[in-house]
Image (tube, rainbow, N blue to C red):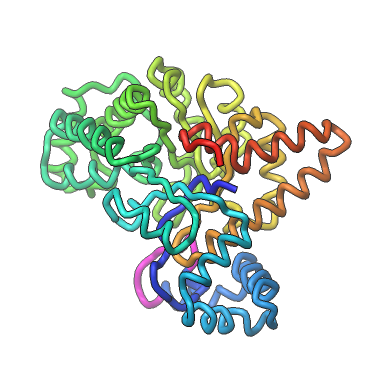
Amino acid sequence: MIDDHVHPFPLAFEPLELSRFTLDVEPGEAAEQRRVTLDRTRVVSEMTRVRLARFLDCDVEDAVAARDRRAREDWPGHVRALFSDAGTTGMLMDAGWQGLPPGGAERYADVSGVPVWELVRLETLVDRLMGEGMSVTEILSAVDAYMEQAVRDGAVGFKTILAYRTGLAVDVTADRDRAERELAADRAGGVAVRRSGKGLRDLVFLRTLERCADLRRPLQVHTGFGDSEIRLAEADPLLLDEALRTPAAAAVDVVLIHGSFPWHEQAAYLAAVRPRVWTELSLSNLFSPATTADRLLRLLDMAPAARITLGSDGHGPPESHWLGMLVLRDAWQEVRTRMQNLVTQRWLDKTAHAIFEGNARNLYGLGER
Protein backbone atom coordinates (compact mmCIF):
# COMPACT_ATOMS: atom_id res chain seq x y z
CA MET A 1 0.00 0.00 0.00
CA ILE A 2 1.21 3.50 -0.85
CA ASP A 3 0.53 5.84 2.07
CA ASP A 4 -0.60 8.88 0.14
CA HIS A 5 -0.13 11.49 2.86
CA VAL A 6 2.13 11.46 5.93
CA HIS A 7 4.24 13.72 8.10
CA PRO A 8 7.60 12.98 9.73
CA PHE A 9 7.96 10.56 12.61
CA PRO A 10 10.86 10.53 15.12
CA LEU A 11 14.15 9.21 13.75
CA ALA A 12 15.23 8.00 17.19
CA PHE A 13 13.36 6.44 20.09
CA GLU A 14 10.59 8.41 21.76
CA PRO A 15 8.14 6.92 24.27
CA LEU A 16 4.58 6.45 23.07
CA GLU A 17 2.22 8.95 24.72
CA LEU A 18 -1.22 8.40 23.27
CA SER A 19 -2.66 11.49 24.95
CA ARG A 20 -0.42 13.60 22.71
CA PHE A 21 -1.80 11.96 19.60
CA THR A 22 -4.84 14.17 19.33
CA LEU A 23 -6.64 16.86 17.32
CA ASP A 24 -6.59 19.08 20.42
CA VAL A 25 -3.44 21.17 20.00
CA GLU A 26 -4.29 23.99 22.40
CA PRO A 27 -1.22 25.06 24.41
CA GLY A 28 -0.83 25.15 28.17
CA GLU A 29 -0.79 22.89 31.20
CA ALA A 30 -4.57 22.85 31.54
CA ALA A 31 -4.96 21.63 27.97
CA GLU A 32 -2.33 18.96 28.51
CA GLN A 33 -4.10 17.72 31.63
CA ARG A 34 -7.38 17.65 29.72
CA ARG A 35 -5.83 15.49 27.02
CA VAL A 36 -4.43 13.06 29.59
CA THR A 37 -7.77 12.86 31.42
CA LEU A 38 -9.76 12.18 28.25
CA ASP A 39 -7.29 9.77 26.67
CA ARG A 40 -8.85 6.59 28.10
CA THR A 41 -12.26 7.55 26.71
CA ARG A 42 -11.13 7.89 23.07
CA VAL A 43 -11.69 5.11 20.53
CA VAL A 44 -8.38 5.77 18.78
CA SER A 45 -6.40 5.35 22.01
CA GLU A 46 -8.15 2.11 22.95
CA MET A 47 -7.88 0.77 19.41
CA THR A 48 -4.16 1.53 19.37
CA ARG A 49 -3.65 -0.38 22.61
CA VAL A 50 -5.68 -3.34 21.34
CA ARG A 51 -3.85 -3.51 18.01
CA LEU A 52 -0.47 -3.07 19.66
CA ALA A 53 -1.23 -5.89 22.08
CA ARG A 54 -2.10 -8.13 19.14
CA PHE A 55 1.03 -7.04 17.25
CA LEU A 56 3.35 -7.52 20.26
CA ASP A 57 1.54 -10.57 21.68
CA CYS A 58 1.00 -9.03 25.10
CA ASP A 59 -1.84 -7.89 27.35
CA VAL A 60 -3.72 -4.76 26.33
CA GLU A 61 -2.88 -3.00 29.60
CA ASP A 62 0.84 -3.65 29.01
CA ALA A 63 0.82 -2.72 25.33
CA VAL A 64 2.32 0.77 25.56
CA ALA A 65 5.02 -0.31 28.01
CA ALA A 66 5.86 -3.36 25.89
CA ARG A 67 6.09 -1.14 22.84
CA ASP A 68 8.48 1.21 24.61
CA ARG A 69 10.71 -1.65 25.77
CA ARG A 70 10.93 -3.05 22.26
CA ALA A 71 11.35 0.32 20.53
CA ARG A 72 14.04 1.50 22.93
CA GLU A 73 16.18 -1.54 22.12
CA ASP A 74 15.98 -1.17 18.34
CA TRP A 75 14.13 1.87 17.02
CA PRO A 76 14.73 1.24 13.29
CA GLY A 77 13.81 -2.41 13.73
CA HIS A 78 10.59 -1.48 15.50
CA VAL A 79 9.62 1.11 12.89
CA ARG A 80 10.37 -1.26 10.03
CA ALA A 81 8.29 -3.98 11.66
CA LEU A 82 5.33 -1.58 11.90
CA PHE A 83 5.52 -0.60 8.24
CA SER A 84 5.93 -4.22 7.19
CA ASP A 85 2.93 -5.29 9.26
CA ALA A 86 0.81 -2.56 7.67
CA GLY A 87 1.90 -3.58 4.19
CA THR A 88 3.14 -0.06 3.44
CA THR A 89 5.32 0.03 0.32
CA GLY A 90 6.01 3.78 0.18
CA MET A 91 5.03 7.15 1.64
CA LEU A 92 4.38 10.64 0.33
CA MET A 93 5.63 12.99 3.03
CA ASP A 94 4.78 16.59 3.85
CA ALA A 95 7.44 17.74 6.29
CA GLY A 96 6.16 21.32 6.38
CA TRP A 97 3.72 20.60 9.23
CA GLN A 98 6.70 20.58 11.60
CA GLY A 99 8.26 23.53 9.78
CA LEU A 100 10.95 21.41 8.19
CA PRO A 101 12.25 22.60 4.81
CA PRO A 102 12.13 20.38 1.72
CA GLY A 103 14.77 17.68 1.63
CA GLY A 104 15.78 14.86 3.89
CA ALA A 105 13.27 12.22 2.85
CA GLU A 106 16.04 9.66 2.65
CA ARG A 107 16.39 9.73 6.45
CA TYR A 108 12.81 8.50 6.84
CA ALA A 109 13.31 5.92 4.11
CA ASP A 110 16.35 4.57 5.94
CA VAL A 111 14.48 4.13 9.21
CA SER A 112 11.20 2.86 7.76
CA GLY A 113 12.68 0.62 5.09
CA VAL A 114 10.31 1.92 2.38
CA PRO A 115 10.69 4.66 -0.25
CA VAL A 116 9.68 8.18 0.79
CA TRP A 117 8.74 10.83 -1.75
CA GLU A 118 8.37 14.50 -0.85
CA LEU A 119 5.43 16.86 -1.05
CA VAL A 120 6.21 20.57 -0.67
CA ARG A 121 3.94 22.76 1.46
CA LEU A 122 3.45 26.27 0.10
CA GLU A 123 2.32 28.09 3.24
CA THR A 124 5.72 27.57 4.86
CA LEU A 125 7.13 30.04 2.33
CA VAL A 126 4.11 32.33 1.97
CA ASP A 127 3.69 32.88 5.72
CA ARG A 128 7.37 33.72 6.13
CA LEU A 129 7.42 36.22 3.27
CA MET A 130 4.22 37.87 4.49
CA GLY A 131 5.81 38.24 7.90
CA GLU A 132 8.87 39.83 6.32
CA GLY A 133 6.71 42.51 4.71
CA MET A 134 7.13 41.47 1.09
CA SER A 135 4.72 42.74 -1.55
CA VAL A 136 2.15 40.65 -3.41
CA THR A 137 4.23 40.70 -6.60
CA GLU A 138 7.38 39.69 -4.71
CA ILE A 139 5.59 36.82 -2.98
CA LEU A 140 4.09 35.49 -6.22
CA SER A 141 7.50 35.57 -7.89
CA ALA A 142 9.06 33.81 -4.90
CA VAL A 143 6.41 31.09 -5.03
CA ASP A 144 7.21 30.49 -8.71
CA ALA A 145 10.91 30.12 -7.96
CA TYR A 146 10.26 27.95 -4.90
CA MET A 147 8.12 25.53 -6.87
CA GLU A 148 10.60 25.27 -9.71
CA GLN A 149 13.44 24.55 -7.29
CA ALA A 150 11.34 21.97 -5.44
CA VAL A 151 10.77 20.04 -8.66
CA ARG A 152 14.48 20.14 -9.44
CA ASP A 153 15.06 18.74 -5.94
CA GLY A 154 12.71 15.83 -6.64
CA ALA A 155 9.33 16.90 -5.23
CA VAL A 156 6.52 14.74 -6.62
CA GLY A 157 3.73 17.13 -5.65
CA PHE A 158 2.70 20.25 -3.77
CA LYS A 159 0.32 20.91 -0.90
CA THR A 160 -1.68 23.87 0.35
CA ILE A 161 -3.29 24.33 3.75
CA LEU A 162 -5.31 27.37 2.64
CA ALA A 163 -8.20 25.96 4.70
CA TYR A 164 -6.14 26.70 7.82
CA ARG A 165 -5.48 30.27 6.73
CA THR A 166 -8.23 32.30 5.01
CA GLY A 167 -10.42 29.39 3.91
CA LEU A 168 -11.30 27.60 0.69
CA ALA A 169 -13.74 30.19 -0.68
CA VAL A 170 -11.22 31.30 -3.31
CA ASP A 171 -12.19 34.48 -5.17
CA VAL A 172 -11.37 33.77 -8.82
CA THR A 173 -11.61 37.50 -9.60
CA ALA A 174 -8.83 38.44 -7.17
CA ASP A 175 -6.25 40.83 -8.65
CA ARG A 176 -2.89 42.15 -7.49
CA ASP A 177 -3.94 45.72 -6.77
CA ARG A 178 -6.83 44.69 -4.55
CA ALA A 179 -4.67 42.05 -2.86
CA GLU A 180 -1.99 44.64 -2.14
CA ARG A 181 -4.51 47.01 -0.55
CA GLU A 182 -6.00 44.21 1.59
CA LEU A 183 -2.58 43.06 2.71
CA ALA A 184 -1.55 46.60 3.67
CA ALA A 185 -4.78 47.04 5.65
CA ASP A 186 -4.27 43.75 7.49
CA ARG A 187 -0.71 44.70 8.38
CA ALA A 188 -1.78 48.11 9.62
CA GLY A 189 -4.56 46.52 11.67
CA GLY A 190 -2.26 43.97 13.27
CA VAL A 191 -4.08 40.96 11.81
CA ALA A 192 -2.17 37.75 12.48
CA VAL A 193 -0.26 36.45 9.45
CA ARG A 194 -2.22 33.20 9.49
CA ARG A 195 -5.48 35.09 8.95
CA SER A 196 -4.30 37.96 6.79
CA GLY A 197 -3.95 38.60 3.07
CA LYS A 198 -6.96 36.70 1.72
CA GLY A 199 -6.64 38.29 -1.71
CA LEU A 200 -2.95 37.41 -1.83
CA ARG A 201 -3.60 33.84 -0.67
CA ASP A 202 -6.33 33.43 -3.29
CA LEU A 203 -3.92 34.67 -5.97
CA VAL A 204 -1.27 32.25 -4.71
CA PHE A 205 -3.75 29.38 -4.95
CA LEU A 206 -4.77 30.29 -8.51
CA ARG A 207 -1.15 30.80 -9.53
CA THR A 208 -0.23 27.47 -7.93
CA LEU A 209 -2.76 25.69 -10.12
CA GLU A 210 -1.10 27.19 -13.19
CA ARG A 211 2.42 26.35 -12.04
CA CYS A 212 1.47 22.79 -11.05
CA ALA A 213 0.10 22.33 -14.57
CA ASP A 214 3.32 23.72 -16.06
CA LEU A 215 5.47 21.54 -13.80
CA ARG A 216 3.23 18.48 -14.19
CA ARG A 217 2.85 17.96 -10.48
CA PRO A 218 -0.39 17.32 -8.52
CA LEU A 219 -1.64 19.71 -5.87
CA GLN A 220 -2.91 18.33 -2.58
CA VAL A 221 -5.47 20.60 -0.92
CA HIS A 222 -6.33 20.22 2.75
CA THR A 223 -10.10 19.90 2.94
CA GLY A 224 -12.41 18.95 5.78
CA PHE A 225 -11.45 18.59 9.39
CA GLY A 226 -8.06 19.02 10.98
CA ASP A 227 -6.66 19.89 14.37
CA SER A 228 -8.21 22.45 16.70
CA GLU A 229 -6.61 25.40 14.89
CA ILE A 230 -8.83 25.01 11.81
CA ARG A 231 -12.12 26.82 11.30
CA LEU A 232 -14.07 23.89 9.98
CA ALA A 233 -16.77 25.90 8.21
CA GLU A 234 -14.07 27.33 5.93
CA ALA A 235 -12.83 23.87 4.89
CA ASP A 236 -15.85 22.57 2.95
CA PRO A 237 -14.57 21.38 -0.47
CA LEU A 238 -17.62 22.85 -2.21
CA LEU A 239 -16.17 26.30 -1.43
CA LEU A 240 -13.54 25.48 -4.07
CA ASP A 241 -16.07 24.86 -6.81
CA GLU A 242 -15.54 28.14 -8.70
CA ALA A 243 -11.77 27.72 -8.58
CA LEU A 244 -12.12 24.14 -9.79
CA ARG A 245 -14.10 25.39 -12.81
CA THR A 246 -11.20 27.55 -14.04
CA PRO A 247 -9.09 26.50 -17.05
CA ALA A 248 -6.07 26.23 -14.75
CA ALA A 249 -7.81 23.65 -12.54
CA ALA A 250 -8.84 21.64 -15.60
CA ALA A 251 -5.14 21.29 -16.49
CA VAL A 252 -3.83 19.94 -13.18
CA ASP A 253 -4.60 17.06 -10.83
CA VAL A 254 -6.14 18.48 -7.64
CA VAL A 255 -6.31 16.07 -4.71
CA LEU A 256 -8.86 16.82 -1.98
CA ILE A 257 -7.09 15.19 0.93
CA HIS A 258 -8.57 13.72 4.12
CA GLY A 259 -11.65 12.71 2.18
CA SER A 260 -12.95 16.20 3.07
CA PHE A 261 -14.52 14.65 6.20
CA PRO A 262 -17.29 15.32 7.20
CA TRP A 263 -18.01 16.32 3.60
CA HIS A 264 -16.78 13.08 2.03
CA GLU A 265 -19.81 12.76 -0.25
CA GLN A 266 -19.25 16.31 -1.51
CA ALA A 267 -15.65 15.39 -2.26
CA ALA A 268 -16.81 12.26 -4.09
CA TYR A 269 -19.18 14.41 -6.15
CA LEU A 270 -16.39 16.80 -7.14
CA ALA A 271 -14.18 13.87 -8.13
CA ALA A 272 -17.04 12.56 -10.24
CA VAL A 273 -17.81 15.78 -12.13
CA ARG A 274 -14.59 17.81 -12.35
CA PRO A 275 -12.10 16.67 -14.99
CA ARG A 276 -9.01 16.26 -12.78
CA VAL A 277 -10.21 16.24 -9.19
CA TRP A 278 -9.26 13.38 -6.87
CA THR A 279 -10.28 12.51 -3.35
CA GLU A 280 -7.90 10.99 -0.81
CA LEU A 281 -9.12 9.28 2.36
CA SER A 282 -6.88 9.88 5.36
CA LEU A 283 -6.88 11.36 8.87
CA SER A 284 -10.47 10.37 9.68
CA ASN A 285 -9.28 6.74 9.72
CA LEU A 286 -7.22 7.79 12.75
CA PHE A 287 -9.68 9.98 14.61
CA SER A 288 -12.97 8.38 13.55
CA PRO A 289 -11.71 4.86 12.88
CA ALA A 290 -14.79 2.78 13.64
CA THR A 291 -16.77 4.20 10.70
CA THR A 292 -13.99 4.28 8.10
CA ALA A 293 -15.59 1.52 6.03
CA ASP A 294 -18.76 3.58 5.70
CA ARG A 295 -16.81 6.59 4.40
CA LEU A 296 -14.83 4.48 1.98
CA LEU A 297 -18.02 2.92 0.64
CA ARG A 298 -19.61 6.33 0.20
CA LEU A 299 -16.59 7.56 -1.74
CA LEU A 300 -16.66 4.51 -4.00
CA ASP A 301 -20.40 4.82 -4.41
CA MET A 302 -20.02 8.09 -6.32
CA ALA A 303 -16.41 8.86 -7.21
CA PRO A 304 -14.65 6.80 -9.88
CA ALA A 305 -12.33 4.30 -8.24
CA ALA A 306 -9.64 5.62 -10.57
CA ARG A 307 -9.81 8.95 -8.69
CA ILE A 308 -9.39 7.71 -5.11
CA THR A 309 -6.20 7.28 -3.09
CA LEU A 310 -5.66 6.31 0.55
CA GLY A 311 -3.36 7.51 3.27
CA SER A 312 -2.83 7.52 7.01
CA ASP A 313 -1.92 11.17 7.66
CA GLY A 314 0.43 9.60 10.15
CA HIS A 315 2.15 12.21 12.31
CA GLY A 316 4.10 11.97 15.51
CA PRO A 317 4.56 8.34 16.55
CA PRO A 318 5.16 5.80 13.75
CA GLU A 319 2.26 3.86 15.25
CA SER A 320 -0.04 6.50 13.75
CA HIS A 321 1.17 5.59 10.25
CA TRP A 322 0.76 1.91 11.07
CA LEU A 323 -2.69 2.18 12.65
CA GLY A 324 -4.01 4.41 9.87
CA MET A 325 -3.13 1.85 7.23
CA LEU A 326 -4.43 -1.08 9.28
CA VAL A 327 -7.78 0.68 9.64
CA LEU A 328 -7.94 1.28 5.88
CA ARG A 329 -7.09 -2.33 5.17
CA ASP A 330 -9.80 -3.56 7.53
CA ALA A 331 -12.26 -1.04 6.09
CA TRP A 332 -11.66 -2.33 2.57
CA GLN A 333 -12.38 -5.90 3.64
CA GLU A 334 -15.69 -4.76 5.09
CA VAL A 335 -16.53 -2.79 1.96
CA ARG A 336 -15.58 -5.73 -0.22
CA THR A 337 -17.93 -8.00 1.70
CA ARG A 338 -20.78 -5.52 1.40
CA MET A 339 -20.25 -5.11 -2.35
CA GLN A 340 -19.57 -8.68 -3.40
CA ASN A 341 -23.11 -9.27 -4.66
CA LEU A 342 -23.25 -5.90 -6.44
CA VAL A 343 -20.13 -6.00 -8.61
CA THR A 344 -17.79 -8.60 -10.08
CA GLN A 345 -14.80 -10.04 -8.26
CA ARG A 346 -12.66 -8.68 -11.09
CA TRP A 347 -13.90 -5.14 -10.37
CA LEU A 348 -13.17 -5.59 -6.67
CA ASP A 349 -9.65 -6.88 -7.35
CA LYS A 350 -8.87 -4.04 -9.76
CA THR A 351 -10.30 -1.46 -7.37
CA ALA A 352 -8.25 -2.76 -4.44
CA HIS A 353 -5.03 -2.45 -6.42
CA ALA A 354 -6.00 0.99 -7.72
CA ILE A 355 -6.96 2.69 -4.48
CA PHE A 356 -4.21 1.16 -2.36
CA GLU A 357 -1.29 1.56 -4.74
CA GLY A 358 -1.87 1.88 -8.48
CA ASN A 359 -3.62 5.25 -8.47
CA ALA A 360 -0.93 6.88 -6.31
CA ARG A 361 1.84 5.54 -8.50
CA ASN A 362 0.16 6.93 -11.61
CA LEU A 363 -0.85 10.24 -10.03
CA TYR A 364 2.59 11.08 -8.64
CA GLY A 365 4.68 9.39 -11.34
CA LEU A 366 6.21 6.88 -8.93
CA GLY A 367 6.59 4.08 -11.45
CA GLU A 368 5.74 0.44 -10.98
CA ARG A 369 7.12 -1.79 -8.24
Residue 310 visible to an observer of this rendering: yes
Name the dominant secondary structure of the magenta segment.
loop
Residue 218 magenta-highlighted: no
Residue 287, by quadrant, is bottom right
Q: Residue at x 27, y 27 (%)?
A: 203
Looking at this rendering, what residue extends furthest in the right direction?
Answer: 341
Q: Which residues are magenta?
A: 21-30
Out of 212 and 103, give the one closest to the viewer. 103
Compare residues 261 and 319 and report the one nearer the observer: 319
Residue 28 is a magenta residue: yes
Q: Residue at x 60, y 70 (%)?
A: 45
Q: Residue 150: where, in percent of width, then height?
A: 28, 39
Which residue is situated farthest in the front direction here?
369
196 w.r.t. 140: above or below: below
The quadrant in which residue 62 appears is: bottom right
Residue 67 % position (x, y) = 56, 78
- Position of 95 relative to 346 (above/below): below
Q: Nearer the viewer, residue 147 or 365?
A: 365
Measured as percent of width and height from the top left, residue 281 is found at 58, 44
User: Relative to 114, does residue 120 appear above or below in the rendering?
Assistant: above
Residue 26: give x, y in percent of width and height.
39, 65
